[in-house]
Structure formats: C-alpha cells, structure tokens
Amino acid sequence: MSMNEVAVMECSLESVREIINDWDPIGVFPMAPDDEYEAEIKKIYEYVSDNTNIGKKELATYISNTFIELFGIDSFTASDIDCLSVAEQILSADF
C-alpha cells in the first residue's frame, strides 16, 4: 500500500469517525471517552469500503444493526430517518 493510499484511508476513516461522533447515537458525550464508538466506526468504515456500490438505505440498515448489536435495542433508539441521514453523510464523504 502506498503512502497516498494510507493517507486516503486515514482521511476516510476520520470522516466516518467525525460523522458518527458528531451524531453521538447513544448520547454519551461529553461524559464518554473520545473513542467510545471506535469499534462501530471501524465496522461501518470497512463495510462501506468493501461495498463500493452500497445504497443509502442498505447502509442505514447496517448502521442501525451495528449499534443495536453492540449497545442493545434499549440504548440505541435512533430513528430510521436518523440512520438514513448519517448514511447519506458517510456516502457523501471523500472515500
């Protein structure tokens, strides 16, 4: 992997990190550590990277399922519209 590819990958991962952290889907900031959602961010980033033709609805479903799986249905209460908005932001980010 070239240095340029590594830089692009880091930029893209940082874009997903910024979008998810700004969203704060569980409502834990500012109390939680900065890396609270890091596992979910990496899963979402890898999913988008591996599925270059993914649609907004499919990504929104993946985002929702990822947070439900890791935090539970009682903690993750974001709406489908919230997940669609976040999916749209991620797909609009530079990858």
Image (cartoon, rainbow, N blue to C red):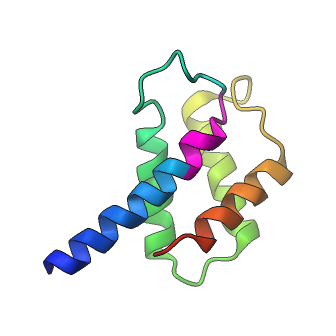
Q: Is residue 27 above or below residue 12?
A: above
Task: Where is residue 76? Give x, y as percent.
Answer: 70, 32
Extreme residue toward the left, this view: 2
> Vertically, is 45 above or below 68?
below
Q: Residue furthest bottom?
A: 53
Q: Is residue 31 left or right of residue 11?
A: right
| Residue at x 44% of width, y 74% of height | 50
- Tell me what residue is drawn at x 62 percent, y 35 percent: 24
Q: On the rendered image, what quadrant is the N terminus found in? A: bottom left
Magenta-span inclusion, residue 24: yes
Residue 56 lies within the magenta run: no
| Part of the protein shown in magenta | 19-26
- In this view, 82 is above or below 15: above
Report x, y in % for residue 64.
69, 48
In-image side of 32 versus 62 (left or right): left
Residue 35 vs residue 47, the one in the foreground: 35
Q: Is 86 or 39 nearer to us in this picture? A: 86
Q: Residue at x 60, y 42 (%)?
A: 22
Q: Main secondary structure of the magenta part?
A: helix
